[in-house]
Image: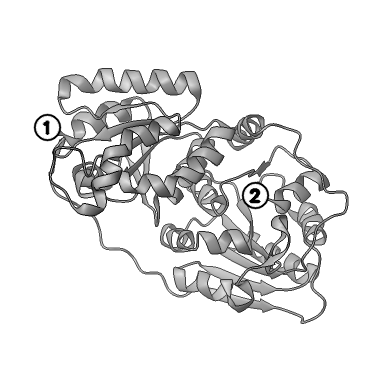
Amino acid sequence: MIAADDFLAPARARGFDFYAGVPCSFLTPIINRVIGDPANRYVGAASEGEAVAIAAGAWLAGRRTVVMCQNSGLGNMVNPLTSLNVPFRIPTLMIVTWRGQPGLKDEPQHALMGEITGALLDTLRLPHRLFPAEAEDVTAALNAAEAEMARSDLPFAFIMEKGSVRDDGLNQAAPDLPERGRWSDQREGGDRPARAAVLERFLEIVPDAAAVIATTGKCGRELFTLSDRAQHLYQVGSMGCASAMGLGVALNVARPLVVLDGDGAALMKMGTLATIGHERPENLIHVILDNGVHDSTGGQATVSEGVDFAEVALACGYARAASADSVAGFARVFEDALASAGPALLHIRIAPGSMADLGRPTVTPPEVARRFQAFLAGS
């Protein structure tokens, strides 16, 4: 058994100081110490997949990251690990607990995952080893993890057995509940605009210094077709994770960060709205382009027609929210959001369909990620 700082201090010396995750009783000592130490940054996520995406955004902004979860949470991580970290080649250190470890008594829901934890990581092609349980083993373990991540640009997992780390208690301030944010209604009730028309206006008014993350599917494809810029990151998978990636970036840069989201994607990861509302990054503008359908898969209806994303955002702690259904209305609320402290959510009702000459990004995901990373690092 080790003290939490036996691992956290040498990890921090190597630059690992941004943590995201979902708690597990095995992780309690590590999470509690990270929370209580101002030298580290911890973001508690609504789901394990969200934590992966938050860490990916933080990595794009120049941080070295650690994602922590119970092994049952690997199921929630499979999509972003395989369709975000792998195609974009984004590394992160993972600490995964070993609930249901064979030979140890545990709850019945952990039995199967306990048997297959290592095999699942093997299937995901993610290297792993046991979390160091002795202080003298920490350096070698971190050396191995760093070497593998440097070789592959992919995540590396430590599997933590029960009782690996001593619990020294939790020192966490009570959450500061914000006042309810402000809502702006710019709806006009006319014909809804095409997404491309909104994106064309967006490209005219978005500041050169702003970073932009476009959700997977036709949103990112239309943005690329209209204008490919270094300030853009086009998601090609990990549906629902654009807002969490945006949060990870926004917490680590001063420049504006714009997430171009879709209704289907936002519905898939609505817990992220609560995480954003809690963290309250003032530079984050979350745009939901809501056409009421899954456009990339044949136009099947989503349930967004009965969802008021602006109200949801305010209930989750966003500082501002707005509703619009025209290009002019979008321009008004976007420029207002740029001039005000966020986070802001802009719910824009648009028409289904996409550009007739829709292209696909010709820059590869690793190239997009590193181009975007260099943009964020620039002055």
Residue tagged by mark 2?
216
Report the quarter where the C terminus lies: top right
- Front residue of this view, candidates 186 and 219: 219
Q: Quadrant of residue 118?
A: top left
State the colouring used for the structure image. Answer: one colour
| Secondary structure of residue under mark 2 | loop
Q: Residue at x 32, y 26 (%)?
A: 13
* Residue 53 image point, x, y percent: 49, 45
Describe residue 295's horizontal placement relative to residue 178 as left or right: right
Asked if residue 339 shows in the view, the reply is no
Residue tagged by mark 1?
1
Q: Residue at x 40, y 47 (%)?
A: 75
Q: CA distance from mark 2 to mark 1?
A: 43 Å
User: Given contact means CB atoms under 8 Å apart, are the residues at marks 2 and 1 in contact?
Assistant: no
Q: Residue at x 77, y 44 (%)?
A: 224
Describe residue 28's horizontal placement relative to residue 273 as left or right: left
Q: Residue at x 70, y 73 (%)?
A: 324
| Secondary structure of residue under mark 1 | loop
Describe residue 64's horizontal placement relative to residue 240 as left or right: left
- Front residue of this view, candidates 377 and 81: 81
Q: Name the kind of residue labelled 2 in the image.
A: Thr
Question: Where 178 falls versus 5 (above or below)?
Answer: below
